[in-house]
Image (cartoon, coloured by chain):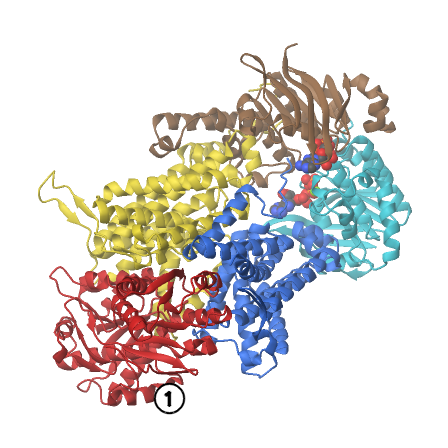
Chain colours: A cyan, B blue, C brown, D yellow, E red
Amino acid sequence: MLELKEVQAFYGTIQALKGVTLEVNAGEIVCLIGANGAGKSTTLMAISSVVPVGGGTIAYDGRDITRLATDRVVALGITQVPEGRMIFPDLTVLENLRMGAYLRRDRAALKADEAHALDLFPILKERRKQLGGTLSGGEQQMLAIARALMARPRLLLLDEPSLGLAPIVVEHIFEVITRINTEGTTLLLVEQNAQMALQVAHRGYVLETGRVVISGTAADLLADPRVQEAYLGMDMA
Amino acid sequence: MLEQQLINGLTLGLIYALIAVGYTMVYGVIQLINFAHGEIYMLGAFFCVTLITAAGLPFYVAMLMAVVCCAMCGILLDIIAYRPLRRAPRLAALITAIGMSIFLQNLALIIWGSRSKPFPRTALPGYLTEQALTVGSVGLSWLQLFIFAVAIGMMLLLYLVIQKTRIGTAMRALAQNRTAAALMGINVNRVISFTFALGSAMGAVAGILVAIYYNTLYPTMGYTAGVKAFAAAVLGGIGSVPGAMAGGVVLGVAEALGAGYVSSLYRDGVAYAVMIAVIVLRPSGILGRAVTDKA
Amino acid sequence: MTPLLELDRISKRFGGLHALADVSFTVACGEILGLIGPNGAGKTTLFNCISGLHPPSSGTILYAGSGGLMRINGRKPEQMTALGIARTFQNIRLFNSLTVLDNVRIARHCRTHANFVRAVLRTRFQRAEEQAIVEAAMERLRFVGLAHHALADAGNLAYGDQRRLEIARALATEPRLLLLDEPAAGMNPRETRRLVDLIQAIVATGVTVILIEHDMKLVMSICRRLVVLDHGTHIAEGPPAAIRENPRVIEAYLGRGAVHA
Amino acid sequence: MVAQAKRLLPVAGVLLLTYPLWPGASEYVLHVMTLALVYMVLAMGLNIVPGFCGLLDLGYVGFYGIGAYTAGLLTIHYDLSFWVIVPLAALNGALWGALLGAPTLRLTGDYFAIVTFGFSELVVLFLTNEIWLTRGPLGLPGIAPITLNLSWLHPQWYFEFYGKAPNFYLAALLVAGVYFVMTRLEDSRLGRAWYAIREDPLAAACCGVDILRYKVIAFAISAAIGAMGGCFYARWSMFLSPDMFKFWESFLVLCMVVLGGLGNIKGALVGAAILVCLGELLREGLGAVGLPPETRFMAYGLIMVLIMRFRPAGLFPAIAASGRANPLLAALSRRIAAGDFAGDRGDNRDTPA
Amino acid sequence: QSVKIGVAAPFTGPAASYGENIKSGVETKVAEINAGGGINGTPVEAVYFDELCDPKEAATVAPRIVRDRAIVGVVGHVCSSAHLAALPNYVRSGMPVISPTATNVTIGEQNADRAGRVWSFRNVYLDDYQGQFLARYAKEVLGLERIAVFYENNDYGIGLKDAFIKEAAAAGLTVVGSEGYVKGATDFTPQLTKLRGGNPDGLFISGYYNEGALIAAQAANLGMQIIKFGADGLDNVDYIALGGAAADNTYMTVPFLAAAAPEQAQTFIRTFEEKYRRDLDWMSANAYDAMGMFAAAVAAVGPDRAKIRDYLAAIDAPEKAYEGITGPTYFNAKGDPEKMAFVKMVKDGKFTAAPQQMR
Ligand SMILES: Nc1ncnc2c1ncn2[C@@H]1O[C@H](COP(=O)(O)OP(=O)(O)OP(=O)(O)O)[C@@H](O)[C@H]1O
Ligand SMILES: Nc1ncnc2c1ncn2[C@@H]1O[C@H](COP(=O)(O)OP(=O)(O)OP(=O)(O)O)[C@@H](O)[C@H]1O
Ligand SMILES: [Mg+2]
Ligand SMILES: [Mg+2]
């Protein structure tokens, strides 16, 4: 479904991606793990065309989307929950949700989806009239995910969804991830919490300084000693 | 006399408000103080008059075409001057805006000459030049009523566009986080262009109204009006459209009352003093929202 | 146990929202207190109250000064810092375009005195003080392991390094009480482990720490005592083992899965 | 290219300083150079507020005007010596800066900008309308030139700064003085507090910086320097009129600062030199290629746009320049290069500070 | 080689239209001289310097003009404040200047060098002369009683207004109110509303034609159908164009009247109107004469700044007066002109000589 070939990206003169090759098949949850600054977020941003691609190609359903503008990419069904949530602080929770469905025209289904999204995260229902900027970190994260779901994406890019969330919410979010996957959405998931991510994912890639260094099925990665040492924290006290 | 001064102030204030709206919208969306906005206002008046005198068009047609031309100028201004600076520091864009303002003003000076021009009265619909009603010593002209109607109508329309339409919400979203807006599928450049077009159109309308009201237009007219309108926009709470309206009216009335009761020489002074006082007491303008800095 | 900080029925309202409602607890000198609770429980808000960013709507904050406990609500952030209360931020807030060293040097502000005249004249006092500032800053940077990056721009540091720089900056104000807001967020296990070591080293120097964290492994391993907030109210307090079993905490925060973690 | 330009700058500066001694030195060029020096003082002064503290100040010319009129009036009515007036004018500027700053510096971003703008307009209105004091639009002519009266030391030592060259050197001295003070402040506790406020006021407060206080200090110093510039200008031009202190001047000085590179002292100098010379070059150049004088400002605006287009961060963008010449930091950088701190990289934390 | 005369005026910025007036006057004179074979065979060239009516710019332009040794005289500056700012340069470096428009009284006190030689002259009335004249004219000829004063807040407007008010008191006129406005303002209704309250029968507009026309129009809108009068600042066709019907019944003092002008003026007026397609205004006329004086001086003493100054300073008595199109002009010891004033009025959308002149 999504195919990255030798993708490179630059911030000014700094090369953040040095040739990332990976693929996501329809119906999968693919997980991207790696240390801070490895280029995970940059990879997602390159897919969404927020960061210009400096080399290599990105194909979606066989179609080259490397140079497509961000809004065109979104229109194709690729939505992102960006790192740092990027909630619209001066829009209410409801308005934020509606922004998620910006490109959608099917008004009828919108209401239902809205209700559905609020059911996934009941706390948002309580806060639906509050401004996005005044939500707590965790609430914002939930809102960001709910907002992305409003677009009914075919491929959802999730950047560290568990960051800063209470354990109970993390659990909940991973449940939601599996749920939307079974409902038919393909997911590309970036996570620091590799343990949990690999438990829900089908396959995974490990990124180091802008390159894919290990790839395999989730089970393989979980068993890989290099992964265990660096990303799973097995020997934690 | 008070009533008369209030009417005068209101007329002036609504015109300021119309210009201020352009500032506020652009500011709201890309945090840029578009100092060239005053020049768009000037261009509006000149386009309209040129279309009437040179092309012989009837007033309403000329006005409409001038407004459309200005909207396009606004878009061009954005594409040529501001778009390349989207990621640059804010002040760079501000300096560019000032540069464009100087450029446009002097361009107009070369094209149309520096002499003040009268607005071709004969092209105006007859009723616009007449007095609507006179009560005692208080007079209200049709022209003033026309200005009230156009200004308030345009601003209501604008408010609805921003609050109720899809592109309006997109404008608001864009204002808050450009990347996130793009990730929602919003065509950022198109929405910004739309904002410039809308703001410039309002500015052009204001320019034309002023040219009729005072029966004069000259290339440097954009400067003072632009500065006042900018003050009005900030006074109202920059980025807020109803705020710009409130700010414009407050400033206009303060000016008229200041000239009438305090000292005609301190007329602008009164306006600025009121502005400073309001901002000091309400640090985010009349209708602006306080910025919450979350730790 | 001598109390360093005592919160007495702290409340904070934002418009109609009660972000904090009558929260009371005490922090003893030298301890690491864990502050946990669901998202939006008011943990960060509590830090904001203590550090003077948002004064509480009601309630008292007592802090051990030279002459016993004193009431410190309503003081401004810089006054709190001068009293020895330092903090880090949930969303990292460094001075990005300044160097790492400058970030820490700025934090020496409240412990130094050179003014305009001295700066212009470069008096002997000023030069000595500048020297001392650099030394103190470098000491903190070495402590967190960033000394070799001293002259790099803070904004260019790796994420984990930025978190540690925030801690170094807070330490440079010579705090007695250090408020850490989710220091491990976004860190991988290896980095988290280094952070644990760092926090323990800080406590070893006699600094009292309040720690907000959602990483239960981390919290449970280094805190002796936890306070749990939910919807702005204080719902539980006690040693990790007890908190882990507390049904209210499980229901509101930990979730069923965590009981066995 | 910029790096080379940077190295050539001091050489060019010194060469220009000898200009009055060149044979055939023109009064006009000297006048323009002196004007550039005046603007350098202003640009350095303004730089403190937007450059160091990150606050947009659109009313700088107000302080310039206050300084100029203070000097002009004190000269005309009391015949005070320039050397007495300079500190008085600077004090008066600082006073107004503090008075304006204290209530308004709480304001964020553009609200502050508009208040400063309003203030400068009020200053101009005052100068225009209080005719009893300032003669208003009639202007203040006949201000005596600067004199240096050391006749109490030696009966021959009486010197009048009449004509261009002496004033040029005096202005250069003023620039040097302000530059010296600015560089010292930049690399000091005060300068760092300002930087912190610029970068993140909230974090700065949590580092113990009293934001309001340091903003007021910045504003007052900036105002004092502006007033000093005005003071020199008054005695040099020997005529003042409120028209000289219009909003446009604030813009111009701001453009100089941004063009040079916000927060960069050298940048402010270069920005001032460029914009002043640009106006004059265009006056000469456009005429030479047969364009009418009307095109001058059009070209001026266009060039400003183009510079920002290609160097949006200004000519000398280095912001965190704080103390690169500082020997302490030089020593530190040598130690880092030598790997002195390499050992601290690891996880050994058994020797806490 | 040619004889160069500098022309310093605002060609850009808000006051640019005044610069245009000056330029057309000078251009006409230069063309005329050169068509007649130049001055003793040498062509004349006018070099234009833009100073935006801005004192700071003027102070920069002045040394620029002085530097060019080929320039032997300056026609300028337009605004008194710009003139005052530039003056120290001219005085110090010895450059004769004739301003066709700067009316501020102070200039006469600042234009002499240390040897007492005056370098700056002008062929325009001073503010106080016109102000006094108008006060008497209003009382004696127009028969007005209650006057509202509306002045521009600049050197010109204030100078004129002060002189008027002083003389008005002496002549027995009542000044019912005095309001000001700033250059470039477009809205005068608040002040007019206030002035209307005093029931004036005459409105003295102490300013220039741009704003003057708007004032007349807005006064009419407010129902003030009264006589307006002002000084030479109002004298421009644009006053009628912008003021429309409201411009009627305005009286103004002018340096010359086409009707009363000497024969040579009639040719000039025709050439001017053909070339610029507008009525002649006094600024252009004064600039034309200022240029003429320089030409006469160069013809007599050659292209030498000091000699030209001496020549101009020697025109100090009626019998030595320069016969220009604005009538005979000579200077007093301060370089200020002695000229007589005419009164002109707007009638049915046209300028005509006022039916009654006054000595
Ligand atoms: N806006 C930017 N400007 C300059 N460099 C950047 C920028 N954003 C990221 N980088 C650099 O690019 C590299 C990759 O960053 P990226 O954010 O993709 O990492 P990541 O794997 O998502 O890390 P994290 O776990 O911290 O989110 C890092 O070295 C980072 O410093
Ligand atoms: N400045 C503010 N204005 C309005 N509401 C606020 C503000 N700051 C916080 N809140 C509200 O107060 C509540 C508590 O927020 P707080 O940030 O303290 O939560 P938290 O416990 O730190 O959560 P998290 O773990 O997600 O960071 C939230 O519901 C939030 O929406
Ligand atoms: Mg990331
Ligand atoms: Mg928090």
Residue at 32%, 54% (x, y): give it: D131
Is residue A197 placed above or below A51 in the rendered structure? Answer: above
Residue B55 on image: x %, y %:
57, 83
Q: Which quadrant holds residue E129?
A: bottom left
Q: Tag 1: Cα neighbours inside 10 Å, few (<14), some, or many (≥20)?
A: few
B22 with respect to E63 (left or right): right
Tell which of B232 and E180 is nearer to you: E180
| Screen quadrant of the C terminus of chain C | top right
Is residue A174 placed above or below E174 in the rendered structure? Answer: above
Residue located beneath label 1 in the image: E274
E184 with respect to B3 (left or right): left
Q: Which quadrant holds residue D45?
A: top left
User: What secondary structure is found at the residue carrying circle 1?
Assistant: helix
The residue positioned farthest toward the top in the image shown: C1
Q: Which quadrant holds residue C129?
A: top left
Q: Chain of mark 1?
A: E
D11 with respect to B244 (left or right): left
Is residue C60 placed above or below A76 in the rendered structure? Answer: above
Residue at 58%, 41% (x, y): give it: C156
Say whether mark 1 is within 8 Å of ligand 1. no
Residue C114 on image: x %, y %:
41, 28
Q: Is residue D348 visible?
A: no
Residue D293 on image: x %, y %:
37, 72
The residue positioned farthest toward the right in the image shown: A182
| Screen quadrant of the N terminus of chain C | top right
Q: Is residue D186 visible?
A: yes
User: Disc 1 marks which amino acid?
Assistant: Glu
